Image (spheres, grey):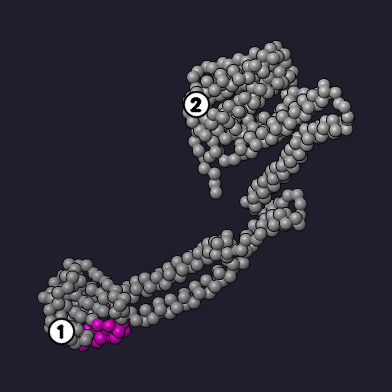
Amino acid sequence: MKVKSNFFKSLRFRIMILLVILGIVPSVIVAGSVVRGYSDRAMELRTSNVKSQCNVLNDVFIQEDYLNHPDSEAANSQLELLANVYNGRIMLIDQDFRVIKDTYGIDEGKTILSADVIRCFQGEESSRYNQRSQFLKIAIPIGNEENSGVMLITASTTEIETTISLLEQRAFIFLGIIIALVIVLSYVLSGFLVKPFSKVTKSIEDLTDGFQSGTISVLDYTETELITDAFNKVLSRMKVLDESRQEFVSNVSHELKTPLTSMKVLADSLVGQQGVPEELYQEFMQDITAEIDRENKIITDLLSLVKMDKKAADLNISKQNINNLLEDILKRLRPIADKRNIDLILDSFRPVEADVDEVKFTLAVSNLVENGIKYNVDDGWVRVSLDADHKYFYVTVADSGMGIPEDAVERIFERFYRVDKSHSKEIGGTGLGLAITKSAIAMHHGAIKVYSKEGEGTTFSIRIPLSYILQEVPK
């Protein structure tokens, strides 16, 4: 089933947003820097030009002794010219803070006290720009040491602001074009960048829909290569599981059918004969009973295996004395071992208490010990050892039996797998015991390993945590 795509959740959309940001943000910064740089430079030039012309005018003031004789026509004409050039206003202030000249003719004769004037009398020039009123205000000391004063110049910056406004409009148009180009290019480029991932999706869909077989391979990026490799591993694992499932079903069918076939043959033999001797009748009925018991054991083991496959929440965990559990297991199996004169030995290196499910743990170890008895030699031995550290406890079941061929060691935990099929009916069992054991130990978050050499015996090693921690299964 195809999932409905949501563009705004897609990788392509995220790449597109990233490219848009990388394209637009620098453009905005550059445009803003250009406009701001022009504004700062224009104000610096305007201030420098005004100061230069004021310094020239100051020489005229000194020559004309203008602070004492403000009626000089030459000085006044240059003042008016300078005020007209900058479309502003010029005021001259003497040492008594009195305005002796105002090109606007408003404040002449008035006293003016301001921070800029006071700093100028202390020898400091000042300049301030009021963007709201679009005027540049400059205070410059004039005169000489004997007769000093202050010139206040207010110069219009309207033409500068007009140029800045024009620059901002062009920058806005430029940014609009850049944004449009970036969006189009990012859409195209993001589509190109995510195309390999679309190829992966298409290949997986074709594979799952049956349009292609085998594996998939998209080597455009390292990421797509890793994804396809991981998918191929999952696919391979699924194939193995499917084959295992088919083999399991086939084995179950065979194992369940065999006793039924034997019972039918025996029953047909009895039905087809008249006057069957009682001894033969009893023998046939005993064989039928044995086949029924065998069928029942197979079904019981299958049910146990199904229960093992359920989630770990089905475990009945409690604190148990592992030493006592192992003693009880050997005590229960000792009569079976005594029939073949096989010694059952328990080595407990220390007292061990752990969180286990008593029934499932006992079933797991019992299967190992029972196998050690079944596949042993007469007058042999089965040794069970128990040890522990600060985190785990360890159970080892070793025997002096016939051992396991090297090529069969990795398969002994498979369901219905038997090492020696020719003696399987003779020895008994269903081929499910080790599978049940492994599942039970896995439910306890433990592990089991086997070491064996044909003709020299087998050793199973179990490791289980002392404290059981329930692991939540993701939904």
Q: Is residue 36 depicted above or below 212 in this figure?
A: below
Secondary structure category for the residue under label 1? loop
Amino acid type at circle 2 is Gln
Please name the residue shown 52% across and 43% down the image: 472
Q: Name the residue beneath numbered marker 1.
A: 108
Give the side of residue 414 with respect to residue 287, left or right.
left
Contact (Cβ within 8 Å) of mark 1 with mark 2 = no
Can the viewer see residue 286 in this picture?
yes
Q: From the viewer's perspective, tell me whether residue 33 is left or right of residue 128.
A: right
Q: Check the image and name the residue furthest to the front.
A: 275
Residue 30 appears in the picture as rendered: no
What secondary structure is found at the residue carrying circle 2? strand
Q: Amino acid at mark 1?
A: Glu
> Is 82 within the magenta?
yes
| Number of disc labels | 2
Q: Is residue 188 above or below residue 232?
A: below
Residue picked out by circle 2? 320
* Residue range (magenta): 68-89
